[in-house]
Image (tube, helix red, strand yellow):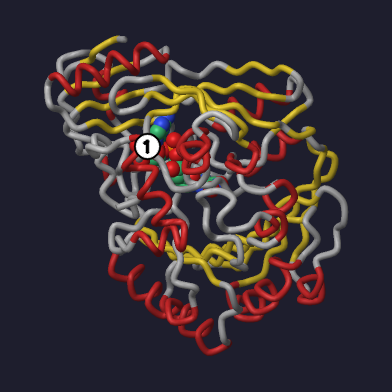
Amino acid sequence: MELIGPDHPRYDELRRPALPQYGHVRPAVIAHCSTTDDVVEALSYARAHDLPVAARSGGHCFAGHSSTTGLLLELSGLSGLSVVDRKATIGAGARLADVYRGLHEFGLTIPAGCGPTVGIAGLTLGGGLGLLGRKYGLTCDRLVAATVVLADGRVVECDEEQEPELFWALRGAGGGQFGVLTSLVFAAVPSPAATRFTLTWPRARAADVIDAWQTWAPDAPDDITASLAVTADEARIFGATLTAEDFGPLGRLGGELCVRSGLSWPALKRSFSDEDVPDDRIIYSKSEFFAAPLPRDTIAQLLAAGCELSFTPMGGAYNHVPPDATAFAHRTERFLLEHAAPDHDAVRRSWSIAHPHASGHLYPNFPDPDLTDPAAYHGANHPRLLAVKNTYDPHWFFRQPLGAAR
Ligand SMILES: Cc1cc2nc3c(=O)[nH]c(=O)nc-3n(C[C@H](O)[C@H](O)[C@H](O)COP(=O)(O)OP(=O)(O)OC[C@H]3O[C@@H](n4cnc5c(N)ncnc54)[C@H](O)[C@@H]3O)c2cc1C
C-alpha cells in the first residue's frame, strides 16, 4: 500500500472524484491500494489515526460519499479480470469500459451501466442499470461471490453459502456500508451482437413522446432497452435491441430513426460513451422511481420547468426477482425519472412537479442529499439491512450518512 499525502505529485490526480462538485474535498491521506492486504493495512492505519474512511472505485457517487477529509481508500490498483467457466472475477477498482473490453475477449459480458469510467464496485453495490438489464437483470443480480474486508480488518469470502446475509446486503443497498469489496465474481452472459438505435423529434413533440414512451418502454420485449432523454432541443429515444426493431407506438410518431446493426457489445457501449463528453460544469440532479405513468398535465408542467429529463425503463428481468431476494427493493417499478440542470433550485422544482405521482422510492446508486429516509432507498428490506450492519460493522466504522441502513 502506498500512502499519498498532499505534497505527493499524484495527490491531486488521485483525490479528484468524477463529479466536479466534490473536487474541493481534500483527504488527509490517500491509501493507493493494489491488493486485499493493502486494504487491510489501510483500514488499520485509519483506525490507528482515528480517520474517517471513504472507499473509492470509480468515484462517480452523486452524493460525494467516495470523497473524505480523512483517509481515501483509492482502489484503482485492484483492476484485474479473469474468467473461469463463465465466472468472471473482477477487481473492485475496475471501470466499466475495461470490464466490457476484458470480458469480450472471452465472448462474454455482464449487464451493467454505460458510463465508461463508472466503477464496477459502486455500480454493483447499488444495483446496476444498463442496456442488457431488462434481459438479464441488475448487475448485482449476476454477482455470485465477493471478497470483503470488514471494519475490524477480517477478510471474508461471501456468497449464497458463506456469510449469506452479508452477500444479500451487498446486492443493491448502496456502497460504503458493510465493508470494502476487493473483488467481485459474476456469472457472465454471452456478449451479444446488437443494434443501436436513436429516434429523435424536435422538442415541440416531447409531450407526445413521453406519453407514448411511458406506456410502451417498460412493457417492451426484454430484448429492447429504450431510454428517453428530453433536452432543450429535442426528445430522443435511444438504446439497444438484440432482436426486434419494433418500437411500438413510438414508430407511429414519425421521429427520425437512426439504426446501426451488428455492433459488438463493447462497440455498442463505446458508441454511447463517445457522446458523453466530460467537462467541469456542475450539473445537479434528482430522481425517483415511478410505478405508474405520469398524467398529461404533469408532463406539460415538467416540460415548462425546463430541466433535462432522463427516463430509464425498468420492468423486464429487473422485476422478475422478488423485492426481498436481494437488498435491491425496487422490483415493481416501471421507470426511473431523473431531472438535471446547472441550477439546483430548478432541479428541485422539476422534481416536485413529478413527485406526487412517484412511488416514493429512490435508486440507491442515485443518492440524493435532500432525501435521507432509509425506507425510500430500501423499502421493506431496511430492518434486515440494519441487522446486517450491526453484525458486520457494529461500531459504524463505515459512516455512510445517507440512505444508510440506520
Ligand atoms: C456519468 C455517470 C454515468 C452513470 N451511469 C450509470 C448507469 O449507466 N447505470 C447505473 O446504474 N448507474 C449509473 N451511474 C450511477 C452509478 O451507478 C453510481 O454513481 C455508482 O455508485 C458509481 O460507482 P463508482 O464505483 O464509480 O463510484 P464511487 O464514488 O467510487 O462509489 C460509490 C459508493 O460506493 C462506495 N464504494 C466504492 N467502492 C467500494 C468498494 N470497493 N467497497 C465498498 N464500497 C465501495 C463508495 O464509498 C460510495 O459510497 C452513473 C453515474 C455517473 C456520474
Toward which corner of the image does residue 205 lie, by quadrant? bottom right
Residue 314, placed above or below residue 127: below
Ligand 1 is found in the corner quadrant, namely top left
Cβ at disc 1 under 8 Å from ligand 1 = yes
Toward which corner of the image does residue 30 lie, by quadrant? top left
Q: Which of these two is toward me, 156 or 349?
A: 156
- Identified at 59% across, 51% down, the residue is 325
- Identified at 40% across, 74% down, the residue is 350
In the rendered structure, the answer to whether residue 183 lies left or right of residue 89 reads left
Residue 300, placed above or below residue 400: below
Residue ID for mark 1: 178
In the rendered structure, the answer to whether residue 183 lies left or right of residue 316 reads left
Pinpoint residue 118: horizontal percent, then vertical percent: 49, 37
Task: Looking at this view, name the residue that lies furthest to the bottom.
Answer: 297
Residue 18 seen in this snapshot: no
Pinpoint residue 17: horizontal percent, then vertical percent: 33, 35
Pinpoint residue 72: horizontal percent, then vertical percent: 26, 27
In the rendered structure, the answer to whether residue 21 lies left or right of residue 37 reads left
